[in-house]
Image: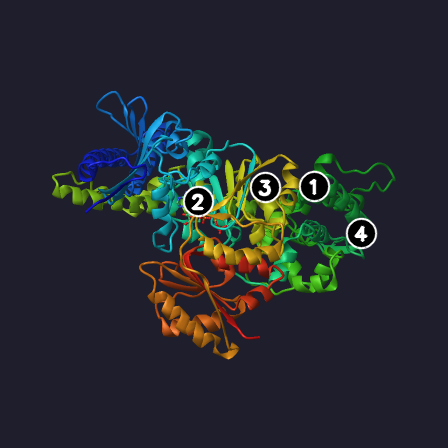
């Protein structure tokens, strides 16, 4: 039987009421099907048409994009399409859902209101004390297309339930969501956004907004819903420039990857810092201290000096042999003078090379002119200006001259500059006199891949060097490759839409065999002539792309060099920065928002705080609070919204029995899960050994660089667990977690606050 509760005691005939809502919800799904069919049909029509003028083609391309997006969007909102209803004092009734649906047959009345529309806001804000014209708020629970339950709140102070928390909206639905088993993928919270979160989600677009909040206060959820809200409210502005969301690691991005699609938004580019330099995949690892050093602002000086070091002045005259064995001498003073002029231009290194060339060629041409044009009678040089120009042209094309120029002022890619610098203790010594010997030694390494901390350095180098033609060609190549990928992606969507249509056929629907009409090659061909590529894809391929809005999650982990890179991607400084300075794990991470932001926006940023932890039950937060006090006695943990009734356990075992006891504890905890997930958080230095012990006993357990979070048991380090959550968490060897890093207490605080229900701590004797 369906469940139904009326928080404020209003009695309803449950099944009748559910039946009535089912009728309405079914009608909405019929409309959704109709809209999807129509979009698919129009997409098919656009694709059948070929040729035409350039303008017709470009109009067609944007129509193809629009209809493909619509098909995708209408499929994405399938689950939980409608989740709420507001009954007004005036007798009005509004249904709230993931997208807006209008009655196309009548007066275009809203049948379903998009949760982001201003008129839907009361669903999140109305309280008994401030009902905002709302008499009743109803949460409609559905599974697939079936209504399974209703939760009503009557917003009347006289009838409000004395047990209801005044500050929570939709308390019953909220608690049901919080107590539900985890799946290994973050879910959206669109049905139960709380007032303090709503204020942040709907904050104005311009400016830098910092959202500080303890573990589990919904910062990530808020950041994602804000992205969806901004794209809805400022669609025109943001769809052309795009929105970038930066997260701390690839596992985290996978964890959150389904939230925006379920909100029908696919245009946000999700990236880690490691992926923010197009063409570079930074998977190499390095010691945390080296990464911290590379994150320091002093690296801007080191790189600037490294570039200057490549603008070389020889100690002795440089000899250049021309074809007729003629030898030209390039005097160090001449080179120095040319270098100064090129530097004074203020251009980036690769762009200033042209000026340097002009100066050197002039000097060499003057030598030749001197020799062959000298008037034996001692008069003026006999060469005309045309003769001199010809000499200069020949010199510019001469391989020996070019080789000399390349040696004196080489055109460099950021990768070349950095690889050469790190590979050479001499170059490091010249570029980094301000660092200690130990720091310089830490920078030295053989070429072979990039680390995440290298990425902001590559970006800085790219700024200092400027883009030369090779880089521009590489960028165009990347965009072309993406266009092919995009074509394949669109085809996938059509295939998806076809399978839906095939199902529909059983009901007498029409088959829209789009994929039968076009194959990938034909589609690629079309894309060749097409300029269309999603904004996010274009932006990903272009280092100099300026995003319309940038959202940074776990922003406390960013180093000063990381901030520089992000600020470059967002010259408008329209940003949402979410994080918790108490959870900073990276050694070069942010100890204070003011310090991190000051260089870019001075005092011009707004701070919002989230104070309620939705994830962590009070019993677990009490344990974590002790660790928080170690980080900073002035910090207060967030208030837990609920208790689980399960006290955390804490056991110490003999050091040599740790792995065996861990296996026992993991097996026991895994058995006590219903359909939820267990996270086993271990010291980074022991993840291989302890992970192997657990997987030997529980083969379903995931472990590795990017462990599969959908497995029931996942063994991972604190770095990997950042931002994630599990029903049950085992924290193993907390002393070692603390000892492993100068920010060890913050790491332990993160580890202890990952559970939604149960926490166990397994210690070892010293
Ligand atoms: N209004 C809400 N309704 C339902 N669930 C919510 C709500 N707010 C937060 N949650 C849930 O609480 C959990 C914690 O949210 P989230 O991961 O966004 O917190 P966080 O502040 O980013 O945490 P951390 O700093 O530890 O990474 C998630 O499961 C999220 O879905």
Which sits in the foreground, 463 or 326?
Answer: 463
Q: Is mark 1 within 8 Å of ligand 1?
A: no
Tell me which numbered mark, 4 or 3, is placed earlier along the sequence: 4
Nearer the viewer's eye, disc 4 or disc 3? Answer: 3
Position of 646 with respect to 434 (left or right) is left
Residue situated furthest right in the rendering: 378
**The residue carrying mark 2 has its beta carbon less than 8 Å from ligand 1:** yes
Residue 363 locus on image (x, y percent): 77, 44
- Could you tell me if the residues under marks 4 and 3 are in contact, i.e. CB atoms within 8 Å? no
Q: In this figure, which residue is indicated by the disc labeled 1? A: 355
Q: Position of residue 439 (x, y in %)?
A: 70, 61
Position of 137 relative to 423 (above/below): above
Q: Nearer the viewer, mark 2 or mark 1?
A: 2
- Give the CA separation, mark 2 to mark 4: 61 Å
Q: Is residue 657 above or below residue 339?
A: below
Per the image, the residue denoted by label 4 is 332
Which residue is found at the position 76% from the left and 38% from the top?
383
**Disc number at residue 567?**
3
Residue 126 at x, y = what percent? 40, 31
Q: Earlier in the sequence, mark 2 or mark 4?
A: 2
Q: CA distance from mark 4 to mark 1?
A: 17 Å
Near mark 4 (Cα within 10 A), the count class, few <14, some 14-19 or many ≥20, is: some
Nearest to the eye among marks 2 and 4: give it: 2
> Where residue 221 is drawn, which disc sits there?
2
Instruction: Tell me the mark number nearer the camera, choosing from 3 and 1.
Output: 3
Q: Residues within 10 Å of mark 3 (few under 14, many from 20)?
A: some
Spatial distance from mark 2 to mark 1, Cα to Cα?
52 Å
Question: Residue 425: image x %, image y %?
Answer: 70, 64
Q: Report the Cα–Cα distance between label 4 and label 3.
A: 40 Å
Which sits in the foreground, 394 or 234? Answer: 234
């Amino acid at each position: 039987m369906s469940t139904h509760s009326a928080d404020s005691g209003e009695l309803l005939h449950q099944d009748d009421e559910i039946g009535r809502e089912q009728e309405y919800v079914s009608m909405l799904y019929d409309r959704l099907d109709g809209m999807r069919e129509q979009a698919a049909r129009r997409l098919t029509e656009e694709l059948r048409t070929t040729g035409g003028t350039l303008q017709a083609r470009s109009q067609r391309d944007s129509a193809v994009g629009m209809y493909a997006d619509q098909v995708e969007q209408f499929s994405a909102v399938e689950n939980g399409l409608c989740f709420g209803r507001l009954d007004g004092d005036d007798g009005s009734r509004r249904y709230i859902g993931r997208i807006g649906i209008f009655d196309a047959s009548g007066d275009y009345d809203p049948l379903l209101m998009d949760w982001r529309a201003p008129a839907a806001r009361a669903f999140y804000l109305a309280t008994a004390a401030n009902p905002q014209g709302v008499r009743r708020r109803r949460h409609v629970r559905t599974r697939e297309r079936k209504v399974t339950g209703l939760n009503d709140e009557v917003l009347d102070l006289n009838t409000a339930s004395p047990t209801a928390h005044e500050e929570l909206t939709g308390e019953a639905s909220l608690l049901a969501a919080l107590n539900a088993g985890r799946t290994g993928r973050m879910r959206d919270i669109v049905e139960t956004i709380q007032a303090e979160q709503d204020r942040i989600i709907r904050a104005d677009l311009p400016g830098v907004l910092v959202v500080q909040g303890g573990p589990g206060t919904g910062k990530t959820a808020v950041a994602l819903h804000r992205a969806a809200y901004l794209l809805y409210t400022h669609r025109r502005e943001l769809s052309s420039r795009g929105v970038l969301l930066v997260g701390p690691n690839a596992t985290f991005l996978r964890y959150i990857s389904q939230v925006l699609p379920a909100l029908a938004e696919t245009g946000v580019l999700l990236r880690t810092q490691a992926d923010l330099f197009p063409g570079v995949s930074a998977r190499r690892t390095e010691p945390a201290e080296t990464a911290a050093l590379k994150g320091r602002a002093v690296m801007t000086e080191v790189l600037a000096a490294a570039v200057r070091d490549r603008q070389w002045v020889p100690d002795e005259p440089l000899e250049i042999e021309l074809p007729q064995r003629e030898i030209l001498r390039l005097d160090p003073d001449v080179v120095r003078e040319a270098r100064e002029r090129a530097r004074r231009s203020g251009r980036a290194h690769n762009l200033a090379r042209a000026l340097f060339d002009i100066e050197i060629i002039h000097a060499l041409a003057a030598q030749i002119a001197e020799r062959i044009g000298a008037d034996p009678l001692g008069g003026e040089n006999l060469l005309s200006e045309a003769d001199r120009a010809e000499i200069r042209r020949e010199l510019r094309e001469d391989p020996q001259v070019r080789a000399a120029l390349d040696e004196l002022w080489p055109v460099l890619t950021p990768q070349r500059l950095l690889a050469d610098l790190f590979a050479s203790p001499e170059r490091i010594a010249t570029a980094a006199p301000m660092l200690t010997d130990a720091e310089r030694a830490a920078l030295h390494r053989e070429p072979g891949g990039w680390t995440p901390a290298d990425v902001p350095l590559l970006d800085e180098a790219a700024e200092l060097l400027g883009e030369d033609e090779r880089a521009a060609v590489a960028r165009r190549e990347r965009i072309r490759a993406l266009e092919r990928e995009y074509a394949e992606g669109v085809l996938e969507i059509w295939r998806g839409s076809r399978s839906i249509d095939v199902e529909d056929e059983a009901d007498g629907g029409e088959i829209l065999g789009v994929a039968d009409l076009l194959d990938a090659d034909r589609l690629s061909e079309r894309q060749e002539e097409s300029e269309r590529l999603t904004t996010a894809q274009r932006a990903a391929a272009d280092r100099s792309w300026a995003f319309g809005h940038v959202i940074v999650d776990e922003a406390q982990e960013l180093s000063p060099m990381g901030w520089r890179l992000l600020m470059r991607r967002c010259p408008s400084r329209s940003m949402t920065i979410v994080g918790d300075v108490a959870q900073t794990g990276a050694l070069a991470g942010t100890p204070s928002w003011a310090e991190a932001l000051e260089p870019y926006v001075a005092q011009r940023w707004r701070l919002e705080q989230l104070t309620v932890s939705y994830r962590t039950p009070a019993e677990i937060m009490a344990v974590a609070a002790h660790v928080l006090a170690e980080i900073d006695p002035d910090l207060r943990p967030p208030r837990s919204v609920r208790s689980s009734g399960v006290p955390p356990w804490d056991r110490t075992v003999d050091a040599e029995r740790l792995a065996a006891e861990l296996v026992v504890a993991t097996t026991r905890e895994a058995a006590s899960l219903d359909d939820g997930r267990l996270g086993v958080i271990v010291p980074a230095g022991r993840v291989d050994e302890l992970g192997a012990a657990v997987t030997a006993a529980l083969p379903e357990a995931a472990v590795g660089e990017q462990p599969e979070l959908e497995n029931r048991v996942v063994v991972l380090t604190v770095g990997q667990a950042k931002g994630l959550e599990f029903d049950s968490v085992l924290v193993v060897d907390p002393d070692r977690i603390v000892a492993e890093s100068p920010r060890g207490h913050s790491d332990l605080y993160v580890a202890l606050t990952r559970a939604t229900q149960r926490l166990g701590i397994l210690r070892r004797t010293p």
